[in-house]
Image (cartoon, rainbow, N blue to C red):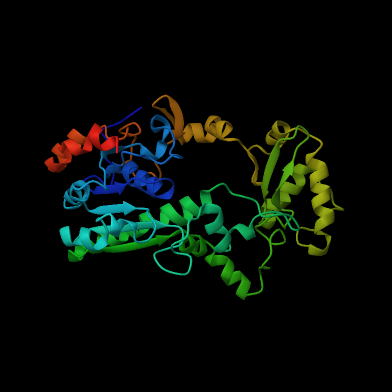
Amino acid sequence: MHDSSSPGPLAGVRVVELAGIGPGPFAAMLLADLGADVVRVDRPDPSPVAPDPAFDVTNRNKRSVLVDLKSPEGPGQVLDLVGRAHLLIEGYRPGVAERLGVGPEACLARNPALVYGRMTGWGQHGPLAARAGHDIGYSAVAGVLGMIGPAGGPPAIPVNLLGDFAGGSLYLVVGLLAALHHARETGTGQVVDAAIVDGAAHLTSVFWGLLASGQWQDRRGVNLLDGGAPCYSVYQAKDGGHLAVGALEPQFYAEFARLLGLGPDAPGQWETARWPELRALIAARFATRTRAEWESVFAGSDACVEPVLTLHQAAASEHLTARRTYVEADGFTQPAPAPRFSATPGALRRPPARPGADTVEVARDWGVPGLLSSETSSDSQAR
């Protein structure tokens, strides 16, 4: 399902993405979903951990050209694209883009209004800046990983959503769009240093306020929102399924307690000294019925109880189906563009880009005939 009639709110914004994996490509995909013209500069020697191009959702709505940045003409080909671009995304370690001849100085010299986005885990400076790393390490150092998990147990791993994509990609996109606004107002571009450790730390802002006010303990599994409170936790049903309970407000908790059948002698919602007793009571009640049976009990209520779904179950759920949150495109299920716009909706316009498949088209549309150099063909790929 592709819709070329919905260009999106970023129609006309041209983006150069220097190929990488993880948060950089996801940020570029978000821009592309919202209508930006994203050209991904792929390398002749792709990363060994790169996903199959046909199923790489982060490359949808993009076009790909193949450039060997280590060849004599490679940097110039990228700079030709930069001369026509509004935004650039790169995710190398600090100093690598400069050594390849496509660092901020070279790019801004070619295009002074360019916004140059740098996506890294540790940032462009600091004691760890030159070190390798991954989401789990960045989240750990930022204080995020240590917040998640049961009291007395190990930290739980929220896949790479909180670091790579929330603390990384989303902050890069916000930075790019803010700097693009500034560039359009002033004609002056700049460099956006988007470090996952910075973004992940920024996500914890509210908890620093709660710490300062004494409303949060700096350890996991004992607080209001980390599973410590029995009214905000996950419980297992009779059949092994799980239900998420978020009955924080008194009126919602009263509805929850009534439908669950806690009874008048149950500990109060905020009797913290009796929380272990209350948790055990709630757990025992949930264990008497299957997840589907509890779903029926809580259906239509404000008890704030929802089933914990797998990815496939989420895609088939009634609410997300009604909203078309997931769509079928290019032979498999994937999330639809988000968020939604009333006048300029985003759309799936193109399948995941195949490396180098769009070189001729991009050379024509962007007016950069130098991309068609024979050095970007098989001779370059063989090096």
* Residue 224, placed above or below residue 63: below
* Residue 285 relative to residue 203: left or right: right
- Residue 217 at what x, y percent from top left? 68, 68
The residue depicted at 33 percent of the width and 47 percent of the height is 31
Q: Quadrant of residue 178?
A: bottom left
- Residue 60 at what x, y percent from top left? 35, 36
Location of the C terminus by quadrant is top left
The residue depicted at 44 percent of the width and 64 percent of the height is 129
Is there any visible trace of residue 239 in the rendered image? yes
* Residue 91 relative to residue 280: left or right: left
Is there any visible trace of residue 324 in the rendered image? no
* Residue 250 relative to residue 83: left or right: right
Location of the N terminus by quadrant is top left
Residue at the far front: name it.
383
- Residue 78 at what x, y percent from top left? 22, 48
Q: Nearer the viewer, residue 319 or 44?
A: 44
* Residue 212 relative to residue 152: left or right: left
